[in-house]
Amino acid sequence: MVKFRDGLMASEQLYWDQAAVFTQVGLIAAEGLPMAEFTEVTRFLREKVTS
């Protein structure tokens, strides 16, 4: 999230999903977690853009 004031960037906040990061580095298993696979999210977004 980026906030602008008077045409300039005033602040930036980064958000990340801790469970997704832990899954990617192998610290926890993805089974049973309410997460979408990266490829599924990418496909969904591409379909929305092209439709």
Image: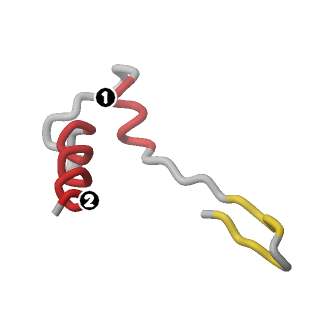
Quarter of the image with the N terminus is: bottom right
Residue found 26% across the figure and 44% down from its top: 42
Q: Residue furthest top?
A: 26
Q: Earlier in the sequence, mark 1 or mark 2?
A: 1
Percent across and percent down for residue 14 are 61, 53
Residue found 20% across the figure and 57% down from its top: 50
Amino acid type, callout 1: Ile
Depth check, front residue: 22 or 47: 47
Q: Is residue 14 above or below residue 8?
A: above
Amino acid type, callout 2: Val
Residue found 36% across the figure and 39% down from its top: 20
Q: What's the CA distance linking mark 1 and mark 2?
A: 33 Å
Percent across and percent down for residue 5 are 81, 77
Q: Is residue 26 above or below residue 50?
A: above
Q: Secondary structure at mark 1?
A: loop
Callout count = 2
Quarter of the image with the C terminus is: bottom left
Which numbered disc covers residue 11?
A: none
Depth check, front residue: 28 or 7: 7
Mark 1 vs mark 2, foreground winner is 2
Q: Which of the 4 quarters of the picture holds residue 3?
A: bottom right
Q: Residue furthest bottom?
A: 6
Q: Residues within 10 Å of mark 1 (few under 14, many from 20)?
A: few
| Mark 1 touches mark 2? (CB < 8 Å) | no
Percent across and percent down for residue 46 are 23, 50
Percent across and percent down for residue 38 are 27, 38
Q: Which residue is mark 2?
A: 49
Q: Which residue is mark 1?
A: 28
Q: Is residue 38 left or right of residue 15?
A: left
Q: Is residue 18 above or below residue 11?
A: above
Q: Secondary structure at mark 2?
A: helix
Q: Which of the 4 quarters of the picture holds residue 2?
A: bottom right
